[in-house]
Amino acid sequence: MLMTVMGRNPSASYYGELAGVRVLITGLSPLCGVDVARKFADHHGRLVVHATAASPELDAVTTMLAETASEVKLFTDACRDSESSIRFAKAAAQAFGGLDVVINLIPIGACDIAGRASVSDVEDLVSEKLMLPVHVTRIVANRMRLTLNEGLVLNVVTMPAPRTAAEAALAGVVRSALAAVTRGEAERWAPQGIRVNAVGPSATLQDSGANLANETDIAALALYLASRPGRTLTGQLFDAAGVARRGC
């Protein structure tokens, strides 16, 4: 399905209508999301970038993005609870007077999974990881509604490819929760022309061959969904099998 909707050479895609697009990217780090941010910067986008911690490496990334982006604003809010997440989402939604695209990057690494043995442990992990994306989705989408601006929200959850049945089951819980959130928010905002899609982890032990293979693929998908050809798609969940293993 991925190559069907995007064409055969996604890495070379350029969409003129995205020139100057206003984009929020949360969860960016030197190891996750750089290709995604760079693709929108190459379209001379105005970028609001969120990271959980400042670092020299992050400074280097933002400097690189500023070379081609029209403007870059960096937030390093921790967003550890609902109150701080909502406060950040409100500030980001108004950074450029509004946003056209939101990409929430949600990496789940081996350290996050370790020790999650019970159902309640897994549910706590899902709640923790989806808290900021859900708040951002709802606040930014409401801002789009108020300004009569159609737009895209793309939530991207990446995990190491499962090696055992237990890891596959955990990935399945994460995927099911993400799918439920995606469907619910897509239905909620569809009347306003606001699309909500997601990229989720595979819950199978073997790759099906129809998955996103790396961050370059995710970046190409994000561009496509934000572009005119991709505006018919909402409520979709794409596979990201093995992305975190290869690099977010």
Image: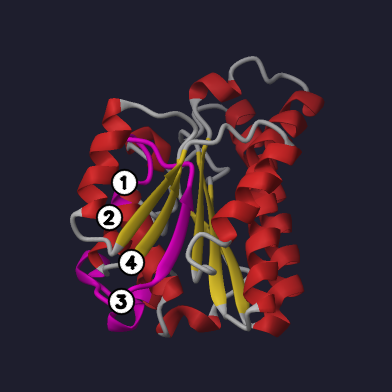
Query: Which percent across, then down, holds residue 36?
Result: 34, 54
Instruction: Tell me how far mark 2 sits from mark 1, CA to CA.
Output: 6 Å
Q: Viewed as shown, does residue 171 lie left or right of 142?
A: left
Sequence-first tag of 3 and 2: 3
Does the residue at mark 2 contact the one at mark 1 (Cβ under 8 Å)?
A: yes
Indicate whether 70 appears above or below 67. below
Query: Which percent across, then down, holds residue 74?
Result: 41, 45
Sequence-first tag of 1 and 3: 3
Q: Nearer the viewer, mark 1 or mark 3?
A: 3
Q: Is residue 19 magenta?
A: yes
Q: What residue is disc 1 on?
A: 34
Quadrant where the image shows the N terminus: bottom left
Indicate whether 56 appears above or below 215. above
Instruction: Tell me how far mark 3 sits from mark 2, CA to CA.
Output: 13 Å
Q: Secondary structure at mark 2?
A: helix
Q: Secondary structure at mark 3?
A: loop
Q: What residue is disc 2 on?
A: 38
Sequence-first tag of 1 and 4: 1
Instruction: Tell me how far mark 1 sits from mark 4, CA to CA.
Output: 14 Å
Q: Residue at x 61, y 38 (%)?
A: 171
Quadrant where the image shows the C terminus: top left
Indicate whether 129 appears above or below 110. below
Q: What residue is disc 4 on?
A: 45
Magenta segment range? 6-35
Q: Secondary structure at mark 4?
A: loop
Q: Residue at x 38, y 40 (%)?
A: 32
Q: Residues within 10 Å of mark 2 (few under 14, many from 20)?
A: many
Q: Nearer the viewer, mark 3 or mark 2?
A: 3
The three-letter code of the residue at mark 3 reads Ala
Query: Which percent across, then down, holds residue 224?
Result: 39, 73
Indicate whether 82 appears above or below 17. above
